[in-house]
Image: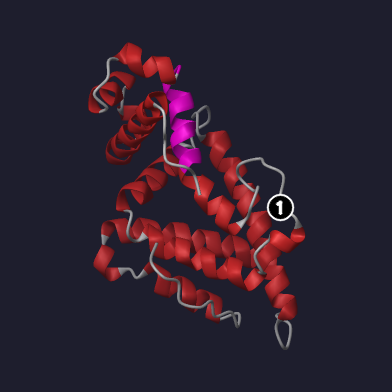
Amino acid sequence: MSQAPRTKGERTRARILDSATELFSRSGYNSVSLREIAAHAGLTLAGLLHHFPGKEPLLLEVLSRRDEDDAASLFPGLLGGDRPPAAEARPSAAERLHRLVGVVGRNSRTPGLVALYAKLSAEASEPGHPARGYFVKRYTLLRAEIGALLGELFDASEPPVAADPRAVAQQLLALMDGLQTQWLLEPDAVPMEERVREFLAAYGLAPGAVPER
């Protein structure tokens, strides 16, 4: 888990990231200026630029910050570029699936961040968008890692599941993202975690209940 900021500079960076996250979530990346983010964070534009040289680096930092804890918990080293942990330190496949479903439940309690991802992932489909590379890399890695996770679970099932784990991983990611969009429009009508559990149950997978974080 990422550490709480300690120095004045770290606290200022965290405040900038909080403001950028809120404004990007509310209005989308393209509609928000650095000056607006600085004002929201209680800084001058020059003060913000002291910590972030432009809007693109700030956006990528906003995106990466949310991934840090999830990657450390689910797939250590996946998104942060760090060396993966020793095999004995890696959570079991059942535990990683348990935590993945926990992320879906967590998202249902963080509408601002869900809105940010939904808006930015759609915007990033445009060529030249600064987050395009981030999302392409993210989906590529997640498809591979979730596919490997499901493959391990399918092989361990009795009898083994015959489905292609790579295809199921792609379907699972599409389901999770699609549910988020529907949930943003009608929160009370779309129980995201329940629907994901139902999808996994169709393949004989039943992750345990995940406590709120």
- Give the residue at x 49% y 44%: 2
Badge 1 crowding class, 10 Å Cα cut-off, few under 14, some 14 to 19, many 20 or more, is: few
Q: Is residue 54 magenta?
A: yes
- Residue 204 horizontal/vertical position (percent): 60, 83
Q: How many discs mark residues in the rendered view?
A: 1
Q: Nearer the viewer, residue 194 or 61?
A: 61
Residue for badge 1: 85
Q: Is residue 79 magenta?
A: no
115 left or right of 195 in image = left
The rendered magenta stretch, by its main secondary structure, is classed as helix
Q: In the rendered view, how is the structure colored?
A: secondary structure
Image quadrant of residue 192?
Answer: bottom left
- For label 1, the SS is loop
Q: Is residue 115 above or below residue 34?
A: below
Q: Is residue 14 above or below residue 178?
A: above
- Residue 139 horizontal/vertical position (percent): 59, 49
Image quadrant of residue 42?
Answer: top left
Q: Seen from this angle, which residue lies furthest bottom? A: 159
Q: Is residue 211 above or below residue 12?
A: below
- Give the residue at x 42% y 35%: 5
Start-end of magenta stretch: 53-65
* Amino acid type, residue under disc 1 in the picture: Pro
83 left or right of 181 in image = right
Can residue 89 be seen at all in this image of the molecule?
yes
Can residue 164 be seen at all in this image of the molecule?
no
Q: Seen from this angle, which residue lies furthest top? A: 46
- Residue 26 horizontal/vertical position (percent): 27, 40
- Give the residue at x 52% y 27%: 128
Q: Quadrant of the C terminus?
A: bottom left
Q: Nearer the viewer, residue 106 or 182?
A: 106
- Residue 9 horizontal/vertical position (percent): 40, 24
